[in-house]
Amino acid sequence: MKRRLRKILSEFLPQEKLIYVYNSYDIVGDIAIIRLTEISKKYDQIIAEAIMNVHKNVKTVLVQTTPIHGDLRLRKLEYVAGENKTTTVHKESGCLFSVDVEKCYFSPRLFYERMRVAKQVTKGEVVVNMFAGVGCFSIIMAIRSEVEKIYSIDVNPVAIKYMQENMRLNRVYGKVIPIEGDAKEVIDKRLRHVADRILMPLPEKAFTYLPYALLALKKTEGWIHYYDFEHARKNENPLEKVRLKVVEKLESLGVAFKIPFGRVVRTTGPNWYQVVLDIAVKR
Ligand SMILES: C[S@@+](CC[C@H](N)C(=O)[O-])C[C@H]1O[C@@H](n2cnc3c(N)ncnc32)[C@H](O)[C@@H]1O
């Protein structure tokens, strides 16, 4: 928890209750999204006021009441304080992202990853972003690289609407091509062997959708940015576990490949990790 926030809270909350306040929260544009425990729930207004005090740009505080769930990766949010709204505009890497945090997936925690991938794109590349959301990876890539175009698929019609709004906000018409639908079907019907690079930023489905990522790649060679969640005990390496799983799958599909880079993107729970592998495919 930020030091100033803890200091403010300690003036209003008994010391023994302070440990029940979650350490982290997300700020998306001018909305703070917090989580509360059974005990800290009683102090929701105090916590919200303290956050608005520390972050002067925060106008709304919402509490997340469910984990991110379902195909669309959404969470239930309830109003706590400030302006009662769920839409905002978030700034990241010089880009603007309009988003409804209740109806679309959005995580400010992936900012490093979005730039990391954008920096690898070379002039004239065609990219397929299989799970594009409101367009964060695609728009940052359109602005920060010399990409030719990025087919940006999402199954959530609301996310596609915001992606279109974000294309307008960031003036990237022509480079980002929004496509509503299931990535599997879209690739099978429209995007076979078109891409130099594939993004798979949906850890829950990336493994089963790997054959479709391969189908979208050009017949010569290309890159796949593969995201997954992995459980690992203290003596285990989450990156190595994912690498072994993917190696086995690609070998079973008869693919020639190398995995020159991988990293743990973030911790997502006790002993749970989000991992990325950069896979170089050669035909
Ligand atoms: C974890 S989010 C990533 C969004 C975005 N790349 C970002 O970083 O903000 C995954 C996205 O995949 C979409 N999705 C889920 N299943 C899908 C599918 N079968 N085909 C295409 N998109 C899908 C969800 O609607 C969600 O927007």
Image (cartoon, rainbow, N blue to C red):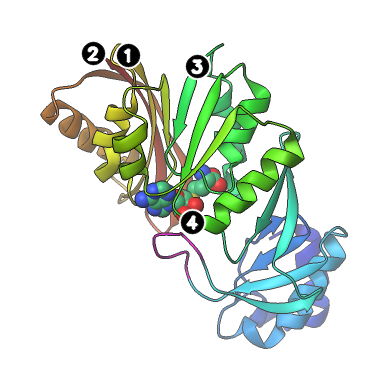
Residue designated by label 2: 283
**Pointer 1 or 3: first along the chain:** 3
Disc 2 vs disc 4: which is toward the camera? Answer: 4
Give x and y (percent) for residue 15. 70, 79
Q: How many marks?
A: 4
Q: Separation of disc 1 and disc 2 at Cα?
A: 6 Å
Query: Which element is circle 3 on?
Result: loop
Cβ–Cβ below 8 Å for labels 2 and 4? no
The disc label shown at residue 221, or none: 1
Q: Is residue 11 visible?
A: yes
Query: Which image quarter: residue 216?
Result: top left
Mark 2 crowdedness (10 Å alpha carbons): few <14, some 14-19, many ≥20: few
Q: Is residue 273 above or below residue 93?
A: below
Residue designated by label 3: 125
Mark 3 crowdedness (10 Å alpha carbons): few <14, some 14-19, many ≥20: some
Residue designated by label 4: 156
Q: Which residues are magenta?
A: 67-74
Label 4 near ligand 1 (CB < 8 Å): yes
Mark 4 crowdedness (10 Å alpha carbons): few <14, some 14-19, many ≥20: many
Query: Residue at the spot x=25%, y=18% of the render?
Result: 257
- Of 245 and 97, which appears nearest the observer? 97
Query: Residue at the spot x=56%, y=19% of the render?
Result: 148
Q: Separation of disc 1 and disc 4 at Cα?
A: 30 Å
* Mark 1: amino acid: Glu
Relative placement, left or right, of 124 versus 209 is: right
Q: Is residue 103 above or below residue 168?
A: below
Q: Is residue 97 above or below residue 256?
A: below
Query: Residue at the spot x=45%, y=44% of the render?
Result: 131
Q: Is residue 236 visible?
A: no
Query: Which image quarter: residue 175?
Result: top right
Cβ–Cβ below 8 Å for labels 1 and 4? no
